[in-house]
Amino acid sequence: MRVGVPRETKDGERRVGLTPAGVATLVADGHDVVVERDAGRAVGFADDDYAASGATLGDAGDAWHAELVVKVKEIQAPELPLLRAGSTVLGFAQLNRDAALLDGVLRAGVRTVGCETVRDADGGIPMLAPMSRIAGRLAPFAGADALGTARGGSGVLLCGVDDVPGSAVIPPVPPS
């Protein structure tokens, strides 16, 4: 199977659909992987890393014209013309929140696998779970940023300093 990894185009999105290690696994299993140039640069994966893993480097069209396109975020409006009928896009689809996107995907004749909707035998959402863990680990950083005076906060440090106490971090109260 030909697998494409396009560069994410959503504003502010820096992630990439596959790491070089993921590419190496797919290539070892006999798949042809094409990665758009600079797709992983923002997160520290150079084109040379992907090439060394067995990927072919190409442009956006090359990545989007694969049988399976692996991305992170939902398809963006400028990406709709790049869709190829009969292909499958694996990523966070968000089709339930965007009627225009759903219409565009249906018109293009592509299948989507929304990572946010895949469930395991126990009803869990295994593809969403890592994103939730990452968000949980980033929460203190976001909270610290929000406390900064540049963001309109009180300037309290989460960790405190010398004789000045830090901010109290209160765990969420479970629903009753």
Image (cartoon, rainbow, N blue to C red):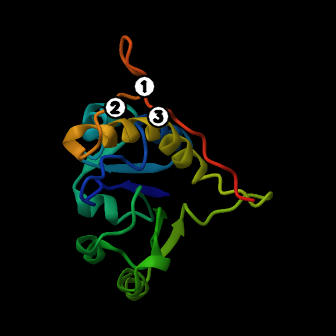
Name the spot of residue 23 as percent of width and height, x first. Answer: 45, 41
Look at mark 3 in the image and give the residue it sits on. Answer: 21
Q: Taking 60 as reference, is 75 left or right? A: right
Q: Nearer the viewer, residue 111 or 176?
A: 176
Image location (x, y in percent) of residue 88:
48, 69
Cα–Cα span, label 1 and label 3 = 40 Å
Percent across and percent down for residue 104 are: 36, 84
**Within 10 angstroms of label 1, few (less than 14), some, or many (20 or more) residues?**
few
Of mark 1 and mark 3, the one earlier in the sequence is 3
**Mark 1 vs 2: CB contact within 8 A:** yes
Task: Classify 10 Å Cα crowding around label 3: few (below 14), some (14-19), many (20 and above).
Answer: some
Q: Decide which of 153, 174 is in the foreground and name it.
A: 153
Q: Quadrant of the C terminus?
A: bottom right
> Between marks 1 and 2, how big is the CA–CA gap?
7 Å
- Marked residue nearer the N-terminal end (1 or 2): 2
Q: Which amino acid, mark 3?
A: Ala
Rendering coords of residue 42 (x, y %): 26, 40
Alpha-carbon neighbours of circle 2 within 10 Å: few (<14), some, or many (≥20)?
some
Q: Secondary structure at mark 1?
A: loop
Label number found at residue 156 = 2
What SS does tag 3 mark?
Answer: helix
Q: How many marks?
A: 3
Task: Point out the residue furthest to the right here.
Answer: 122
* Circle 1 residue: 166
SS for tag 2?
loop
Of 132 and 87, the residue lying toward us = 132
Judged left or right of residue 27, residue 43 is left
Residue at the image point whose x is 29% and y is 39% from the top = 154
Q: Quadrant of residue 164?
A: top left
Closer mark to the observer between disc 2 and disc 3: 2
